[in-house]
Image (tube, grey):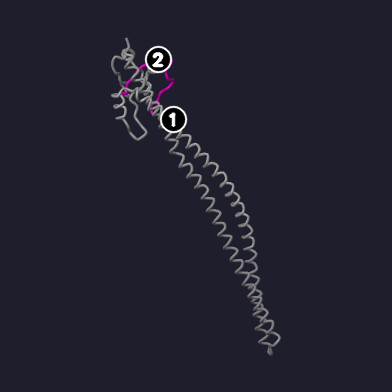
Amino acid sequence: MPDLNLTLELAFLYDLQQIDAEILTRHKKLKLIPDDIRKLKEDFRVHEQKLNALKDQLSQAEKEQRSQSAEIEALGEQRKKYQTQLTAVKTNDEMKALYKQLEFIDQQEEEIEDKVLELMLIIDDLGGETKKEHEILAAKNVDHKAEEAELQKIAQGIKADISEIQEKRQNLIQKVNPDLLKQYQGRTTTQHTHLDLVTPVVDNNCGNCKLTIPPQMLNEITQARKKIACPSCKLILFELPTFEQPNDTTSE
């Protein structure tokens, strides 16, 4: 006759393993959330840097335009000065020299006006790009705040789930055989991770590594008079009642 005590002990430990797997899954999800928030902020920062760069370029272009415009004004004052001097010249040589200076001023003014026109086109383009990027940044700011709030909400939900599952774990752990529990806890790899110790037989196969169990070993597992380990993965095998048979059990 099968030893129901051993079967139940192994079943309880298996349930504990399943709960620990659930906790681990939630901890993994929780661990990803800060990275997701960081990526949101990084994406926003990239657009913010682009907007600031456009603003700097626009400011520089406007500064250059003001400087060139000031040059034109200075040339205009210089022209007035030479034109005034023309009314007082007494020789042809003096007149020729003044006209030459006026011609040079006209030439310089024309070149500067071309630069100013070019700068106006640049400023117009930069102004359009800056406005567009500002609108993109404003929209992203709204979206990112909403997404971050949603991620924080998800994190709180996961923490609540973990807390609830931990309560179930505490209740279940009281039912686990102390020796089995100690052996299981000895397989701890991290704060939230334990290597499995037991696994059910599923369709005559090891529920962990899928090895087909020989008939004689299956019979010993059913009798449950002693612990039987899988020849391949070395996990302790046990038989669940038919209505509790899992479809697929894979070790984390």
In the depicted structure, whether residue 83 falls above or below residue 236: below
Residue 156, how many percent across, how many down? 47, 37
Residue 102, how many percent across, how many down? 66, 79
In the depicted structure, whether residue 242 falls above or below residue 81: above
Residue depicted at x 71% and y 86%? 87
Q: Is residue 200 left or right of residue 35?
A: left
Q: Quadrant of residue 119?
A: bottom right
Task: Categorize mark 2 by other alpha carbons within 10 Å: few (<14), some (14-19), many (20+).
Answer: few
Does residue 185 belong to the magenta stretch?
A: no
Residue depicted at x 49% and y 36%? 154
Q: Nearer the viewer, residue 175 or 115?
A: 175
Residue depicted at x 51% and y 44%? 40
Residue bearing mark 1: 164
Residue 89, how many percent across, how many down? 68, 88
Between disc 1 and disc 2, whose residue precedes? Answer: 1
Disc 1 residue type (three-letter):
Glu
Q: Nearer the viewer, residue 23 or 53?
A: 23
Residue 167, how many percent across, how many down? 40, 29
Q: What residue range appears in magenta?
A: 234-252
Q: CA distance from mark 1 to mark 2?
A: 27 Å
Task: Categorize mark 1 by other alpha carbons within 10 Å: few (<14), some (14-19), many (20+).
Answer: few
Does residue 242 belong to the magenta stretch?
A: yes
Secondary structure character of the magenta stretch overall: loop
Disc 2 residue type (three-letter):
Pro
Q: Secondary structure at mark 1?
A: helix
